[in-house]
């Protein structure tokens, strides 16, 4: 993506952005617990698919906030809303493949599509609005598989969700192209320095969570 003009300073990561990141660090902790409780190839596949969904919500919202400016009131409202939905999604991770898939899927879909609709309607430039419209089209393709997976028996759930996760991944890696309307991401104004700082701080918080989680898991064995 095209980086904004070089400057000596760039907007610091706000406390709101850090709180947002913390919600998704906790989600990764929940996924780790799921993997520890299901140490099989099937459990690993389930964890990977759910990880794609969780990271997708974090990545999309983070990039959207960076593109639309966290100082905008509307952008802050979107961030807080996704934080709340993320907490519900976290609560559903442990039972996503059991008897409560909707607690995971519904907040996840709302956290993806709601902000995309807001961005497609309010982004400051026509190019950005068209970009988020393309994102919505891709979400519309993957959403039926997420819903179908939640509605079907557990033996089919992971396969439907794997297809949905693959669609979301391909859309992200290819910049959400649509027939006759692909947008080159180099055309989008993007504060790369701010995003790199977000990712650096996210990884630091995640590392702390991993250390604490490791101590929790190893303590019973040491005893």
Image: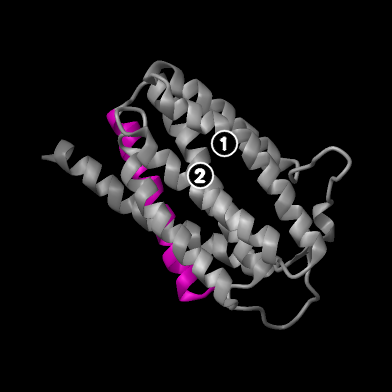
Q: Is residue 137 left or right of residue 218?
A: right
In the image shown, does 163 or 152 lie closer to the viewer?
152
- Gap between marks 1 and 2 measured at Cα: 7 Å
Relative horizontal placement of residue 142, taking residue 219 as reference (left or right): right
91, 78: nearer the viewer: 78
Judging from the image, what secondary structure is the residue with disc 2 in? helix
CB within 8 Å, label 1 to label 2? yes
Q: Is residue 130 magenta?
A: no
User: Residue 143 — which label?
Assistant: 1
Q: Is residue 27 magenta?
A: yes
Q: Residue at x 42, y 21 (%)?
A: 152
Q: Residue at x 55, y 54 (%)?
A: 114
On the rendered image, what quadrant is the C terminus found in? top left
User: Which residue is identified by label 2?
Assistant: 109
**Residue 20, image quadrant:** bottom left
Q: Which residues are magenta?
A: 13-37
User: Where is residue 38 shown, x and y percent of the image?
Assistant: 31, 26
Q: Quadrant of residue 44?
A: top left
List x then y, in percent, for residue 176: 74, 43
Q: On screen, 85 above or below 189? A: above
Residue at 84%, 51% (x, y): give it: 184
Q: What percent of the width, then of the height, locates residue 185?
A: 80, 54
């Amino acid at each position: 993506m095209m980086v904004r003009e070089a400057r000596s300073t760039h907007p610091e990561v706000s406390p709101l952005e850090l709180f947002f990141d913390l919600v998704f660090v906790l989600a990764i902790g929940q996924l780790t617990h799921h993997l520890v409780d299901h140490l099989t190839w099937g459990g690993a596949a389930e964890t990977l698919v759910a990880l794609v969904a969780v990271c997708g919500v974090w990545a999309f919202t983070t990039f959207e906030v960076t593109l639309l400016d966290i100082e905008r009131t509307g952008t802050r409202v979107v961030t807080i809303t996704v934080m709340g939905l993320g907490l519900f999604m976290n609560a559903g991770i442990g039972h996503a493949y059991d008897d409560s898939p909707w607690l995971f899927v519904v907040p996840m879909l709302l956290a993806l599509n709601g902000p995309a609709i807001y961005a497609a309607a309010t982004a400051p430039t026509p190019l950005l609005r068209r970009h988020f419209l393309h994102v919505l089209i891709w979400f519309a393709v993957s959403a039926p598989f997420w819903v179908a997976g939640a509605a079907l028996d557990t033996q089919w759930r992971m396969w439907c969700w794997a297809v949905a996760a693959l669609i979301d991944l391909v859309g992200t890696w290819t910049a959400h192209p649509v027939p006759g309307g692909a947008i080159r991401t180099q055309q989008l104004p993007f504060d790369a320095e701010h995003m790199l700082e977000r990712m650096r701080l996210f990884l630091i918080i995640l590392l702390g969570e991993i250390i604490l989680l490791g101590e929790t898991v190893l303590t019973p064995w040491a005893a």
